[in-house]
Amino acid sequence: MDVDREQRAPAGAITVEDEAADRRVLCLRGDVDTAVATRFTSARGRERVVVDAIDAGGVTFISSSGLALMLLCAEASAAAGRRPVLRRSSRPIDRALQLAGIDTVFLRPEAEEPPR
């Protein structure tokens, strides 16, 4: 067993940042692998993560678990009457969304509807 490998910090991170009193952003950075996604969901328990935006511009790798987490957040947000915007994405995110056939699920800033 490689002790150094076990003690290393994860290569990626997922956080929820509050931008304003009512605006939350799901932030993904680095290598968002299964371990990173599992750590995030385990820390939240059964809490549904409702966000207004997703910032994945700093992602260097994303696993299917990371994509599933993004979808779960989008579904929870839709159930709460919100539709999160994929504010920033990296090439690995765009490619993974395209390969999974879900690249049209997330609004992009240029596709955001104007306020009424």
Image: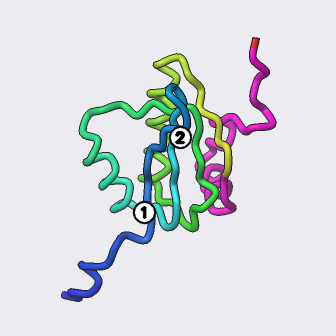
- Residue 28: x percent and y percent? 51, 54
Percent across and percent down for residue 99 are 63, 54
Q: Residue 87: which numbered mark, if any?
A: none
- Asked if residue 48 lies left or right of residue 56, the reply is left
Q: Which residue is at a point 29% across and 41% down the rendered structure image?
A: 44
Q: Are marks 1 and 2 in contact (CB under 8 Å)?
A: no
Circle 2 is placed at which residue position? 25
Image coordinates of residue 10 in percent, x first then y, are 37, 70
| Above or below for 104 versus 13 | above
Q: Secondary structure at mark 1?
A: loop
* Amino acid on which the number 2 mark rests in the picture: Val
Give above or below for 41 relative to 63: above
Q: Which residues are magenta?
A: 89-115
- Quarter holding the N terminus is bottom left
The quarter of the picture where the C terminus appears is top right
Badge 1 is on which residue?
A: 33
Q: Front-most of 76 and 7? A: 7
How many labels were placed on the picture? Answer: 2
Which residue sits at x=45%, y=65%? Answer: 12
Colour setup of the view: rainbow
Does 95 sit left or right of 16 as displayed?
Answer: right
Please give the name of the residue rendered at 46% of the width and 54% of the height, measured from the top-left corner: 64
Q: Residue at x 63, y 62 (%)?
A: 92
Q: Give the mark nearest the N terminus, 1 or 2.
A: 2
Three-letter residue code for mark 1: Asp
Please name whichever residue, 55 or 70, is drawn nearer the observer in this view of the structure: 55
* Left or right relative to 95: residue 110: right
Residue 114 on the magenta segment: yes
Nearer to us in this view, 43 or 18: 18
